[in-house]
Image (cartoon, coloured by chain):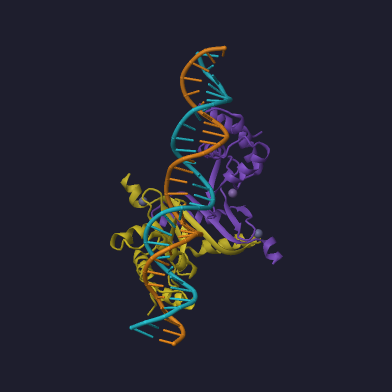
Chain colours: A yellow, B purple, C cyan, D orange
Amino acid sequence: MKKSLLQQFEDHLRSQNLRLTDQRKLIVNSFARKKGHVSAEDLYRHIHKTTPSIGAATVYRTLKLLADAGLASGKNFGDGYVRFECCLQRSAHHDHLICTRCGKIVEFSNSTIEKLQETVARDHGFLITDHSLDIYGVCQDCSVKQ
Amino acid sequence: MKKSLLQQFEDHLRSQNLRLTDQRKLIVNSFARKKGHVSAEDLYRHIHKTTPSIGAATVYRTLKLLADAGLASGKNFGDGYVRFECCLQRSAHHDHLICTRCGKIVEFSNSTIEKLQETVARDHGFLITDHSLDIYGVCQDCSVKQ
DNA sequence: AATGAAATTGAAATTCGTTGTCAATAAGAA
DNA sequence: TTCTTATTGACAACGAATTTCAATTTCATT
Ligand SMILES: [Mn+2]
Ligand SMILES: [Mn+2]
Ligand SMILES: [Zn+2]
Ligand SMILES: [Zn+2]
């Protein structure tokens, strides 16, 4: 059985001599339940409803910690704020389709595109460390609706 | 012979009943000379050296106007600010390789990748309106240096 | 359990790129 | 030249994110 996000986070905290607090537990569990593409502000507002004692700064800080631990990654889809998604080992690299009407984000991966990117980089003398492919468009639901 | 960026900008201004000012002339020409991937702040600082009377707001506004005219486009490479590049008809769509060491930005285009994106979108019921592919890595100069 | 050093917290202040406000100025049609 | 209206520069305001700081909490050590 796989370790949960919280369990892996606890491991990280221990290994770095950081402390496990109630706030961190709650934030990480809320984040895990949301299943990705969540901004710090989104998560804060959600948490605030049931636990208003938790401050926004702590949510920002905890998401940053998760990212430092390699357990989440932040991505800017161009709408002004960073969305986080957890990146546990099982959920491999993927790219995104974004609906410009309703904001829906669909994940995909295409190994041919990935390989071609390697080729492009090599042709230009670059050693790839990362990449980001975002396809913007109108999803089926939205194109049916109008 | 092709019309210059300024000439096309003038056409746009006339067609929209907007006014051609000395500031706009200077900003657009500076921008054209810089050949893309320039932030408003970059351009403002550059212009400020020789023409300190031009305000930053005017540089921001003029770049926005160029974008509205379809003569420039802004892109966020994830480092906090928007970089503009001119998009005259001749300079077709392209994607970017970004060196994470020195910040160099190299343009490329790969029609096979473009076609595959269409396929991916269609498979997910999306109608593509736009896309953005950024490959991050280390350029040749930087990997030689260390 | 009690201690205490060090990490963490929430609230508020601060940062930074960008946009809005506004009175003064300039463009350009008449 | 006149007159309407767009444009300007300085500065305030914005919003996401980060920093500051005094109060609180964690947790290794007694
Ligand atoms: Mn995703
Ligand atoms: Mn480019
Ligand atoms: Zn949609
Ligand atoms: Zn480089």
Q: Nearer the viewer, residue C12 or A93?
A: C12
Work out which residue is located at the far right of the displayed protein and give it.
B145
Q: Nearer the viewer, residue B102 or D16?
A: D16
Q: Does residue A145 appear anywhere in the picture? A: yes
Residue at 67%, 65% (x, y): give it.
B143
Residue D13, how many percent across, how many down? Answer: 43, 42
In the figure, residue A124 lies in which quadrant? bottom right
Residue D21, how many percent across, how many down? Answer: 47, 61
Horizontally, residue A82 falls left or right of residue B8, namely left
Q: How many marks?
A: 0
Residue B104, how many percent across, how many down? Answer: 64, 55
Horizontally, residue B69 falls left or right of residue B90, namely left
Residue A25, how many percent across, how many down? Answer: 36, 71
* Quarter of the figure with the N terminus of chain A: bottom left
* Quarter of the figure with the C terminus of chain A: top left
Residue at 30%, 63% (x, y): give it.
A51
Q: Please say if B82 is above or below A86.
A: above
Q: Does residue A39 appear anywhere in the picture? A: no
Q: Please say if A3 is above or below A62.
A: below
Work out which residue is located at the far left of the displayed protein and give it.
A50
